[in-house]
Amino acid sequence: MGPTRKPNVCSQLSRRALGFFARDAGVVQRTNLGILRALVCQESTKFKNVWTTHSKSPIAYERGRIYFDNYRCCVSSVASEPRKLYEMPKCPKSEKIEDALLWECPVGDVLSSPSDYKSSLIALTAHNWLLRISATTGKILEKIYLASYCKFRYLSWDTPQEVITIKSAQNKCSVLARQAGIQQTVLLYLAVFRVLPFSLVGIVEINKRIFGNVTDATLSHGILIVMYSSGLVRLYSFQAITEQFMQQKLDLGCACRWGGTAGTVGEAPFGIPCNIKITDSPPLLFEVSSLENAFQIGGHPWHYIITPNKKKQKGVFHICALKDNSLAKNGIQEMDCCSLESDWIYFHPDASGRIIHVGPNQIKILKLNEIENNSSQHQISEDFVILANRENKKENLITVTASGRVVKKSFNLLDDDPEQETFKIVDYEDELDLLSVVAVTQIDAEGKAHLDFHCNEYGTLLKSIPLVESWDVVSGIHGIPDSPVP
């Protein structure tokens, strides 16, 4: 258990007003967040429903903003009662926003326009336009036409807040093409941009002739990750690929001649040509085989998590050192549970190097330590465990034989039995340093849920908030609020 002394909020506010804290902006910010955390978690703080709405399309949440109708309508949830920030004009389905990311102004950078210092929504439309939209007014600040030779569909961060990756839908060979013996060589495209000001890194094609039968590919932190149906995962340096295979450097807004056609890069109808064509196998950085391509890297020093590539090993996780593939001591993690839904595991997003392992009835926070007298070897140990509030119940199965004898047989319920409290969501709130946990219990036809705040350092339960609405209603919202306002 961690320390139980609670900070006195009134005392802290008085000291802040008198200037007792250091003038360093980071100290003031941490103090303010500590005050907010104390207010959120104190026993007397009550949460109540102040606003209700319905939507036929998915609802998205990001940094105090709620998005409806494929990001066309934005509502601010920061005030005591949500208010509409903007609503963009209606558009046909062929032009709707497919995916979006929230970009926030970097600290210390000198930008060309005053509007660049405010948050923007980077959006991808169904007709291949990349938009930068003001997060407060909905005004389109920049627009780039991507291409007509493929359908771009997914947005993700390669480097958070710095570099984005736009992935196309996979090219599938039509029945007529297969009958004609035409082979589909380009499987998908990845477009890479630096953000604000937008600058093109390049568009790379993932080619079947070079990579084989790829099922998926993506970019993360400058690493090209290629996945196969066999469970194989291969990693390549995207910088090395760019340096070796870029055919021509392209600049947005500049005139270009490509394949006998002239136009302006990033403007319709010319768009952006695919300028990185891999013609030979690039240097392989790393490869590993894992069930369903499940593969993660993290920890201090670098380790990775995989599931052995056999169906009977589902739910078994191996934690290995990246430098030599050696298995960490106690590195085989298997949650002792019997459930329909499998448990999941991932590196803690707080950059502590810890690991979160979530099952239906328990959450294990694991830590990676050096073995004493052997700094090259590491071991996995439990930091703390959060348990669901449930009873170990056994059910009796009663049968009657042909002779009339009554037979009772005891059996254990599933660990994710809907009538037992079951963990559904675990999320980390970085500013308040809290673990947010949603647990659900099925009562009659509806699922009743509660949101719990746990201390990220010790796992202590700080606050439990029952959700009035049924779980079927609230589970449709993507994301958990970053800083709830009491």
Image: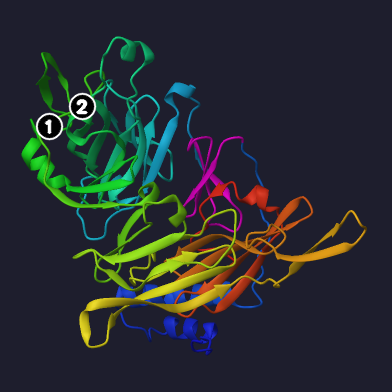
Of the image marks 1 and 2, the number of the one nearer the N terminus: 1
Decide: is 7 above or below 218.
below
Decide: is 260 above or below 5.
above
User: What colour scheme governs how the chains and residues are painted in the rendered image of this protein?
Assistant: rainbow
Q: Position of residue 272 (x, y in %)?
A: 20, 27
> Mark 1: few, some, or many residues within 10 Å (few <14, many ≥20)?
many
Res. 272 mark: 2
Instruction: Answer left or right for 129 relative to 3.
Output: left
Res. 250 mark: 1
The residue under the point 23% across, 30% down is 208
Question: Which amino acid type is marked by label 2?
Answer: Ile
Which residue occupies the foreground of this view, 454 or 210? 210
Task: Report the number of numbered marks.
Answer: 2
> Mark 2: few, some, or many residues within 10 Å (few <14, many ≥20)?
many
Q: Position of residue 243 (x, y in %)?
A: 7, 42
Spatial CA distance of label 1 from label 2 is: 8 Å
Instruction: Answer left or right for 352 relative to 357.
Output: left
Q: Secondary structure at mark 1?
A: loop
Which residue occupies the foreground of this view, 175 or 11? 175
Whether residues under marks 1 and 2 lie with C-beta atoms below 8 angstroms apart, the answer is yes
Q: Position of residue 315 (x, y in %)?
A: 47, 58
Q: Position of residue 330 (x, y in %)?
A: 37, 74
The quarter of the image holding the C terminus is: bottom right
**Is 332 inside the magenta-drawn segment?**
no
Magenta region, residue range? 56-84
